[in-house]
Image (cartoon, rainbow, N blue to C red):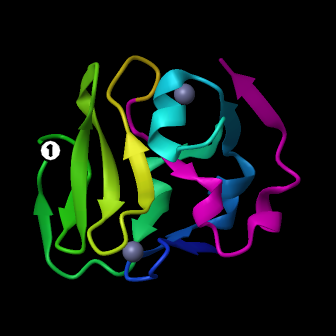
Amino acid sequence: MLTGSCLCAVNKYTVTNEDVAAARKITCHCARCRKISGGYTTTNLILPKTSFKLTSASTWRSVVPGLSNNCTSTFNAVLPGDKHGHICFCRHCGSVIYRESEMQGFSGLVFVPVGTLDDIDSVSNLREEEWY
Ligand SMILES: [Zn+2]
Ligand SMILES: [Zn+2]
């Protein structure tokens, strides 16, 4: 089981090992990812939504119809140019926890920033793809 959290650790998550092994690890250079992360690039794991579980969630409510539920310790922002996509942030520290999109090819998947993993070396053996 992989674990991760936001900066303040109010929001924690788990990913099952089998799903980590099948994950794609993408380093993206696009303008949107730069704006989201504040860095030159962003590296995300792309995983099935079903394998990603926020474990700190207490009060669940759906804020984006058809997409993942949210909890009171997070808030969602809509992704510009992707009206069905959103980014889930920690309400307390502002870290990006995951994002998802309903754009073609991404439905049912979550993007999880590798920097939120508790042990970043646990995904060092995954082949890295680069997107521009
Ligand atoms: Zn936090
Ligand atoms: Zn990108």
- Secondary structure at badge 1 equals loop
Q: Position of residue 12 (x, y in %)?
A: 45, 77
Task: Name which quarter of the figure residue 116 lies in.
Answer: bottom right
The residue range painted magenta reads: 107-132
Q: Position of residue 95 (x, y in %)?
A: 43, 62
| Crowd rating for badge 1 (residues with CA inside 10 Å; few <14, some 14–19, many 20+) | some
Task: Name which quarter of the figure residue 128 lies in.
Answer: top right
Instruction: Judge left or right: residue 73 versus residue 51.
Output: left
Task: Name which quarter of the figure residue 27 lies in.
Answer: top right
Check mark 1 vs ligand 1: CB closer than 8 Å? yes or no.
no
Quadrant holding the C terminus: top right
Q: Is residue 10 above or below residue 25?
A: below
Instruction: Look at the image and say whether residue 124 sits in the magenta stretch.
Output: yes
Residue at x 59% of width, y 75% of height: 3
Instruction: Judge left or right: residue 49 versus residue 57.
Output: right
Residue at x 54% of width, y 34% of height: 34
Q: Residue under circle 1?
A: 64
* Ligand 2 sits in quadrant: top right
Residue at x 22% of width, y 59% of height: 75
- For badge 1, the amino acid type reads Val
Q: Position of residue 65 (x, y in %)?
A: 11, 41
